[in-house]
């Protein structure tokens, strides 16, 4: 009986066909299946009855649970395994209970959660194979502990450990009819460290690669290659093992910032692209992960807060809708962390249900539509690894463009190719210091052909491995020479030492004005970057802004009791230049103004960055919106259809990230102007939530309309012909 039911579940997943916007049909692949799951998260704790779990899932309109199988607490397990012991004190097979219960329902799915790497409990190691453990240069095992358990870091290059782990995964897939497998990791250790293993298998990685028997110093030198090999070995072996039993979705939470991890997205069906915990993260920090994670063409799971620091409360507020719809509007799958408080306090269930029901009713809208390509903003993994605080530059640019309602999407390092850039009007390189020659060529080609380019600070000064070049590799496009880093020092505690002055009337300074000063002052922020590039313009450069140095009155300097002497401003070199290259326009900004925006939120800074986008794209925005900064928008498309998503996160959420949103200020009469897609006219505009048809006016090039009211989320469905 059980086997029959498992087969039914399998066939349900292997054969369904769904309609994409009424136009074509395709069979769901594993990526589609994983995208469309509506999961609750449940980690490391025990439920009273599986029936109760199913009941809460059904009430929430969730259809999957990411439930612990192989534990983070030392590789104990929550089911009956031939390979790992059950958690001490646990006399139940929790996976069996869930699997048996879910068989009674048409659409409830088990997605086991397995910690991969981290540490293995000492008793398991000692019993199974003591050599699973990482060893120091001196040959001793490295103890680790977490949450009260003690154990040892394990080696991801150890075939004994990885094979045993893979067999345990096969066993789960064979025995429990699971709909997919999820891995937290792989990790070389835990929060306390790990990943400096000198075992025979780590030695072998280097011996095989370089053909010599390596000494310890050689292992130190090639550590990142050894660890990258461990990630690859673990993920490849385990994914293959699972798929040898049944072709189901396999999702990893593999971080992607460590060397070697980014490419491994290719062997997965998806990743946890936004492991976000609301208690620690501002909206923009959460959004940064959503928007950058959306660049992967796989299932992108994202914690829809609740996060793990709020495990014991339910969300009877607007957070699930605000974050869930932000994720869905960008093609990510919200997964709710965590479920167990909902078992005992059902007040938050309606919020979760509302979010999952929107998702279920509009799956194609969220997972088949793609962002209308306009500005591409590479989120460079090669820079994450090499450029200090790279993600803050990126978050600053993200915030500035979002607050100005510019249409943009993240792309990956590998997406910077001549072919792929063709669909964009502009590329925004936010301190993309590390770039390969091939990427440089693609950008040159793109701009030569008429594409727009905005770049800041040290963009292109280093190669992809972080080796410095003699000059900016994009110097021909920027029309500037790089002359080094300018690092203003502080003589006294108050006031900026440098201003950036707008020196001319230009579309880039529109709404800012000639002679306006923008203060370069990060001194109260924790960011380390307060420097900017010292540049000299080359022929063809149009100087938009220069540097103004603060010069203290010398008579006051050194006088006791004075910490803020009178000052004058002294002219410095150019700092923002505009130019053309081939058919394209270029703006190069020597300071990291996007980081300044992240730090200070000066509205003139975001205005300037947005003006730069408008200028390099010759004012061809696909959508213009008159609305406040905290209105997030995304224009997506599929065939002749477009959809304009709005998320409104105004309201009482400004005190601390951990404060939940229980009210947003509704927005009224939002004016929207859409550029008509080439050769097409708008036929119909409908609001997703209310079904209301909007009236609109078209001048042949643009179509304008008014959205009468926006609460948390709305979407205009647009039919073109
Ligand atoms: Zn090792």
Image (tube, helix red, strand yellow):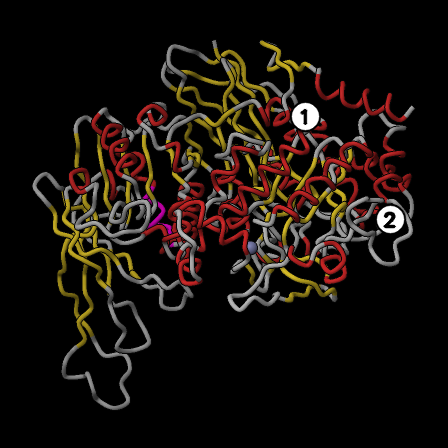
Q: Quadrant of residue 560?
A: bottom left
* Image position of 487 (left or right of 210): left
**Disc with the residue nearer the chain's start (2 vs 1):** 2
View quadrant of ligand 1: bottom right
Residue at (55% x, 24% y) in the render: 716
Vertical position of residue 84 compared to residue 176: above or below: below
**Where does residue 619 sit, x and y in percent of width and height?**
30, 29
Between 317 and 246, which is closer to the camera in this rendering?
A: 246
Instruction: Name the disc covering residue 47, or none.
Output: 2
* Image position of 672 (left or right of 664): left
Estimate how packed mark 2 is, as few (under 14), some (14 to 19) or many (20 or more) residues with alpha carbons within 10 Å: few
* 46 is within the stretch colored magenta: no
Task: Kindly identify which residue carries mark 1.
Answer: 247
Residue at (18% x, 75% y) in the render: 552
- Closer to the eye: label 2 or 1: 1
Between 273 and 385, which is closer to the camera in this rendering?
A: 385
Label 1 sits on a secondary structure element that is: loop
Image quarter (top left, top right, bottom left or bottom right) of the N terminus: top right
In magenta, the rendered stretch is 602-609
* Image position of 678 (left or right of 357): left
Residue at (91% x, 52% y) in the render: 91
Vertical position of residue 27 compared to residue 655: above or below: above
Residue 709 visible in rendering = no
Q: Is mark 2 within 8 Å of ligand 1?
A: no
Residue at the left extreme, as displayed: 539
**Where does residue 15 sit, x and y in percent of width and height?**
71, 15
Question: How far apart, in angstroms, are the residues tagged by discs 2 and 1?
Answer: 29 Å
């Amino acid at each position: 009986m059980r086997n029959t039911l498992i087969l039914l579940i399998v066939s349900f997943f292997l054969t369904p066909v769904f309609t994409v916007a009424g136009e074509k049909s395709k069979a769901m692949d594993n990526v589609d299946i994983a995208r469309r799951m509506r999961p609750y998260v449940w980690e490391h704790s025990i439920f009273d009855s599986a029936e109760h779990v199913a009941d809460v899932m059904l009430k929430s309109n969730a259809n999957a649970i990411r439930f612990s199988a192989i534990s983070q607490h030392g590789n104990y397990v929550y089911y009956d395994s031939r390979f790992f012991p059950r958690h001490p004190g646990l006399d139940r097979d929790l996976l069996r209970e869930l699997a048996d219960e879910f068989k009674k329902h048409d659409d409830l799915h088990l997605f086991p959660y397995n910690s991969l790497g981290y540490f293995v409990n000492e008793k398991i190691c000692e019993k199974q194979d003591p050599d699973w453990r990482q060893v120091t240069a001196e040959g001793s095992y490295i103890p680790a502990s977490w949450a009260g358990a003690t154990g040892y870091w394990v080696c991801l290059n150890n075939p004994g450990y990885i094979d045993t782990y893979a067999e345990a995964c096969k066993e789960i897939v064979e025995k429990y009819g699971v709909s997919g497998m999820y891995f937290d990791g792989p990790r070389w250790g835990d929060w306390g460290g790990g990943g400096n293993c000198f075992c025979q298998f780590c030695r072998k990685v280097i011996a095989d690669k370089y053909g010599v028997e390596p000494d310890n110093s050689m292992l130190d030198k090639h550590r990142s290659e050894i660890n990258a090999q461990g990630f690859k070995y673990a993920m490849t072996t385990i994914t293959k093992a699972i798929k040898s039993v049944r072709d189901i979705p396999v999702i990893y939470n593999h971080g992607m910032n460590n060397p070697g991890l980014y490419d491994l997205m290719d062997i997965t069906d998806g990743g946890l692209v936004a492991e976000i915990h609301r208690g620690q993260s501002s909206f923009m920090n959460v959004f940064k992960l959503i928007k950058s994670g959306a660049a992967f063409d796989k299932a992108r799971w994202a914690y829809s807060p609740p996060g793990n620091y709020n495990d014991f409360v339910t969300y009877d507020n607007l957070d699930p809708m605000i974050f869930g719809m932000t994720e869905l509007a960008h093609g990510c799958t919200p997964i709710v962390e965590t479920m167990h408080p909902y078992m005992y306090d059902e007040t938050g269930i309606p919020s979760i249900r509302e979010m999952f029901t929107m998702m279920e009713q509009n799956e194609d809208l969220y997972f088949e539509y793609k962002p209308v390509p306009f500005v591409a903003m590479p989120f460079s993994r090669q820079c994450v690894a090499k450029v200090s605080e790279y993600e803050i530059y990126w978050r600053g640019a993200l915030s500035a463009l979002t607050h100005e309602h510019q249409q943009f999407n993240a792309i990956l390092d590998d997406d910077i190719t001549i072919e792929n850039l063709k669909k964009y009007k502009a590329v925004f390189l936010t301190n993309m210091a590390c770039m390969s020659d091939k990427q440089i060529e693609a950008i040159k080609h793109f701009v030569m052909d008429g594409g727009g380019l905005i770049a800041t600070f040290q963009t292109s000064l280093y190669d992809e491995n972080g080796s410095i070049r003699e000059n900016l590799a994009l110097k021909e496009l920027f029309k500037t020479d790089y002359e080094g880093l300018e690092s203003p020092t502080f003589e006294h505690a108050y006031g900026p030492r440098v201003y950036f002055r707008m020196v001319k009337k230009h579309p880039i300074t529109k709404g800012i004005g000639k002679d306006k000063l923008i203060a370069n002052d990060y001194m109260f922020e924790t960011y380390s970057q307060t420097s900017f590039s010292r540049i000299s313009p080359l022929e063809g450069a149009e100087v938009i802004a220069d540097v103004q140095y603060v010069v203290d009155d010398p008579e006051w300097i050194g006088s006791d009791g004075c910490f803020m002497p009178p000052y004058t401003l002294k002219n410095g070199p150019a700092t923002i230049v505009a130019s053309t290259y081939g058919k394209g326009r270029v703006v190069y900004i020597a300071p990291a103004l996007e980081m300044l925006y992240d730090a200070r939120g000066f509205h003139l800074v975001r205005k300037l960055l947005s003006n730069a986008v408008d200028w390099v794209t010759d004012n061809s925005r696909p959508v213009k919106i008159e609305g406040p900064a905290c209105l997030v928008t995304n224009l997506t498309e599929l065939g002749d259809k477009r959809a304009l998503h709005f998320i409104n996160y105004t309201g009482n959420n400004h005190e601390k990230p951990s404060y939940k949103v229980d009210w947003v200020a509704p927005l009224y009469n939002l004016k929207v102007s859409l550029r008509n897609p080439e050769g097409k006219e708008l036929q119909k505009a409908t609001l997703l939530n209310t079904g209301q048809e909007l009236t609109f006016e078209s001048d042949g090039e643009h179509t304008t309309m008014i959205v009468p009211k926006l609460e948390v989320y709305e979407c205009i469905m647009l039919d073109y012909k």
